[in-house]
Image (spheres, rainbow, N blue to C red):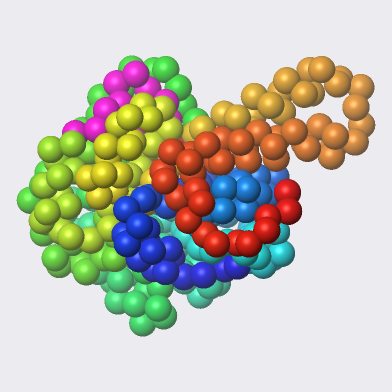
Amino acid sequence: MLVHIKDLVKESQKGGYAVGAFNVHNLESILGVARAAVRAKSPVIIQVSEGAIKYMGLKPVTHIVSTVAKNVAAKVPVALHLDHGKSLDTIFECINAGFSSVHIDASDLPLDENIALTKRVVEIGHAKNVWVQGEVGVIVGGHGQTGKELKIPLAKLEDVEQFVKKTKVDTIAAGIGTAHGVYAEEYIKFSLLKSIKEKTKIPFVLHGASGIDDNKIKKAIKMGVNIINIGSDIKIAFSKTLIDNCLKNRKETDPRNLLRPTIQAVEDVVFNKMKLFGSAGKVDVGEVKT
Ligand code: G3H
Ligand code: ZN
């Protein structure tokens, strides 16, 4: 069922686990994420980037997620979120389309401009009962990229503190060592995470979580990370499965036969993340038919 993100986050705070926010790109990945949530009996955040909205269209993706939440994942709570919104037009369209949460990513601007822009989105979002996520300290890398050498900057604690105080965002993302994609250089600066949690006291969103060691993820959750974003691991599983299946079945002419295994591949990745994040088993769904 479709719910407000605040309900998921409040429950996760009480239960001491993190909710996964999974990037979707098409019908197959939406189904994979939804089926994983049902199988894991877990709450879930389905998030779309501006790129995914451009690819699917805002109305189609909003309706598909709502319909899948209502029918496929009727017994588990599903929240719809805009990830890394850069364009104000897109952010306002998502607010009006029924998203319960939007991320305004103005982290590449000077701090005062980031604060001013984010504050504007918070005022409009809150008037419509929509949560707003802000970001300080650019989270570098590229979704789905792997391997290349990367320099990862860290957010400044005083900037994060000032930003949260002035903007009144509901959730905060900040550069703490992780990057979008899978890179050898990624890490988590736990001392910075600890200080951010102490100073801001609002839910922290860990971006760039693909490629981060399981033990570090568990430690970050213990230290108060509330939402964990996973994008690249889904893209990689989807693409690898599709390529392998196409190569094995070069003469196949039914797209469903080529795409079907990708749904399962996404489901498996997301199911394992839900177990890792501690959100699996947190929803009482009664008997689950799989
Ligand atoms: O906003 C999305 C996430 O931060 C995804 O990061 O591609 O490293 O999983 P990832
Ligand atoms: Zn991100």
| Residue found 49% across the figure and 34% down from its top | 232
Q: Specify whether 162 is left or right of 17.
A: left
Q: Where residue 78 sits: x, y (%)?
A: 54, 61
Prevalent SS, magenta region: loop
Which residue is at the front of the view, 69 or 39?
39
| Residue found 79% across the figure and 23% down from its top | 246
Q: Specify whether 237 is left or right of 140.
A: right
Farthest residue, direction left: 158
Up-down relation of residue 176 to residue 94 (above or below): above
Q: Where residue 286 sits: x, y (%)?
A: 63, 62
| Residue found 43% across the figure and 63% down from its top | 8
Up-down relation of residue 5 to residue 48 (above or below): below
Up-down relation of residue 170 to residue 209 (above or below): below
Which span is picked out in magenta? 179-189
Q: Quadrant of the N terminus?
A: bottom right
Q: Where residue 116 sits: x, y (%)?
A: 21, 65
Decide if residue 55 is in sight here.
no
- Which quarter of the figure has residue 2? bottom right
Which residue is at the front of the view, 96 or 89?
96
Decide if residue 191 is in sight here.
yes
Would residue 255 be counted in the magenta stretch? no
Q: Where residue 16 sits: x, y (%)?
A: 32, 53
For the image, the number of numbered tags is 0
Farthest residue, direction bottom: 127
| Residue found 36% across the figure and 27% down from its top | 213
